[in-house]
Amino acid sequence: MTLLAVENLTVSRGGLAVLEGVSFSLAAGHALVLRGPNGIGKTTLLRTLAGLQPALAGRISMPPETMAYAAHADGLKATLTVRENLQFWAAIYATDTVEAALDRMNLRALEHRAAMSLSAGQKRRLGLARLLVTGRPVWVLDEPTVSLDAASVALFAEAVRAHLAVGGAALMATHIDLGLAEAEVLDLGPFKARPPEAGGHRGAFDHDFDGAFL
Amino acid sequence: MIALLARDLRLAIRAGGGFGLGLAFFLIVVTLVPFGVGPQGEILARIASGILWLGALLACLLSLDRIFALDFEDGSLDLLATAPIPLEAVVTIKALAHWITTGLPLVLAAPLFAVLLHLPGPAYLWLEVSLLLGTPALSVLGTFGAALTVGLKRGGLLLSLLVLPLYVPTLIFGAELVRRGAEGMAIEVPLTMLAGITAATVALVPFASAAAIRVNLR
């Protein structure tokens, strides 16, 4: 079953097209890793898929209420404890999987600590535990392994594998090898937007902007 | 949505949350006025309603920039925008949380502070009524300014410039209601205007604030 299909998508950052003609589909039980050099538009693509910014062109089809997005920032509240942070998101998504998430991301020993006293890697683990409490099938992850040590990366890979096994799907932008043998890789390099002189999109100025003043 | 309200209230009362700041500011403004104007009771009584309303307005303004800025900085605003509750509801809940932590304490403490300004006896009831009706509009209008300035560094001053003019109608009718109450005049017109402004603000502004946040998150 296809959970996410992207056809001929063009995304823009700061009014300029960065990627064009991106097409892929993601089926249940599959993971797709986005690769490409810094600045190619991985984050922009993921934010567009998450609905935080409009696409310049193309189509995104996805059943409603299926996606959980995790950005660079974890969205943690420093003065709340680990458990309170997770409970908040569990309440927002109306699920009750806080205990399972604490165990799976190895946060049980830290559950009553305030998030501000966690190390960078522990914060990241808490941010990823948030995905588990959303109960959403499609995970859209932006650099999920930043500041994780080798053991935590393995823990995370295990969580993704378990998620795929129950019919979930994951779309990740990452530079490192997660050890997920089953993940497909999509190199974004070939989709780099052409400059306007070469017939590419002109971003926000596509609709004959100059003509409006003549 | 109740979870969001509970989280915001919990954050406000924990260390660094800023609970009570507005109230302390209100107290200081009201205490400073007799020093500046002089201790003559009859002058203070005449300007009391205006000073109390102005103090409430500034105290409310003090904590507005925190409404969305903190959530923006730690990334939770992005996550809330992709969460299964509409952004309009997020804005409304945040305005409610701001009112509970700022507006409501002002309403409750205002009669005590009014004593410092020799507010005439009959005006106390109308001071309470006017603040209770008017302060929710201050919080909701504040979300609009906070939403417009959410991505900006040091957006606090710009926020004040944007929001204070929007507070003018509430200030006029709120202070007028107290003044008329103090002098025993008919209060129907300022009362209905004040209530009407608040009702319209609460109904319409969350949509504008949510739209401003969506633009700022792009």
Image (cartoon, coloured by chain):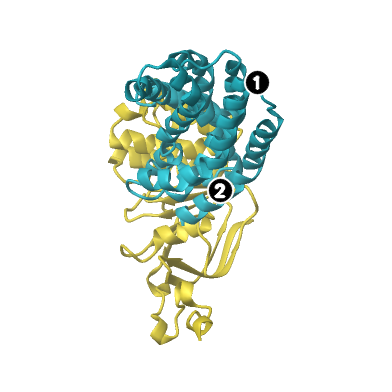
Chain colours: A yellow, B cyan
Percent of width and height locating residue A49: 52, 58
Residue type for callout 1: Gly
Up/down of A5 relative to B63, above or below: below
Percent of width and height locating residue A168: 56, 47
Q: In this view of the protein, can residue A102 be seen by the observer?
A: yes
> In percent of the image, x 51 and y 86: which residue is there?
A214
> In percent of the image, x 47 and y 15: which residue is there?
B118
Residue type for callout 2: Ala
- Whether tag 2 and tag 1 are in contact, CB under 8 A, the answer is no
Q: In this view of the protein, can residue B86 be seen by the observer?
A: no
Residue of label 1:
B184
What kind of element bears circle 1? loop
- Residue A155 occupies which quadrant of the picture? top left
Up/down of B58 relative to A5, above or below: above
Up/down of B166 relative to B5, above or below: below
Tell me the number on the disc at residue B210: 2
> Between marks 2 and 1, how big is the CA–CA gap?
42 Å
